[in-house]
Image (tube, rainbow, N blue to C red):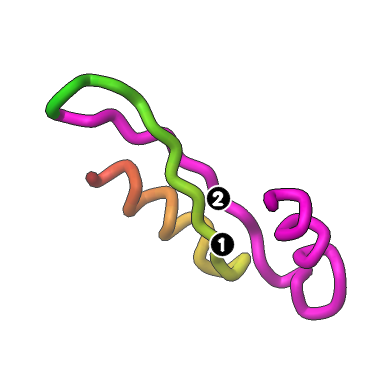
Amino acid sequence: MAKKVVATLKTGKGKEYSKVITMVKSPKTGAYSFKELIVHNDHVKDAIDEAKAQ
């Protein structure tokens, strides 16, 4: 499924978007998980800053 998303992002208006993957640590168990977002290129820094704040 990830291949399909990445392939779609490379064509047409999809070039204006980026896939942001952040690592999030669970406060309860201490385990890490990954959170994936697809955001506009202008908002990549905002998405990363928001993930760090959590």
Q: In the rendered image, which residue does mark 1 sit on?
A: 38
Residue 13 vs 37, above or below: the answer is below
Q: Amino acid at mark 1?
A: Ile
Q: Can you give x and y, in whole percent of width and height, for residue 54 in the image?
A: 23, 45
Residue at the farthest front position: 1
Q: Amino acid at mark 2?
A: Val
Residue 3 vs 13, above or below: the answer is above
Magenta span has 10? yes
Task: Give whichever of 45, 26 is nearer the camera.
Answer: 26
Q: Can you give x and y, in whole percent of width and height, for residue 2 in the image?
A: 69, 49
Magenta span has 20? yes
Which residue sits at x=28%, y=29%? 25
Which residue sits at x=56%, y=62%? 38
Which residue sits at x=86%, y=71%? 11
Residue at the farthest right position: 11
Does the CB distance between marks 1 and 2 fall below 8 Å?
yes
Q: Is residue 36 left or right of residue 15?
A: left
Q: Residues within 10 Å of mark 2 (few under 14, many from 20)?
A: some
Q: In the rendered image, which residue does mark 2 sit on?
A: 20
Query: Would you identify the image quadrant in which residue 18 lies?
Result: bottom right
Which residue sits at x=55%, y=65%? 39
Residues drawn in magenta: 1-27
Q: Is residue 12 left or right of residue 49?
A: right
Q: Residues within 10 Å of mark 1 (few under 14, many from 20)?
A: some
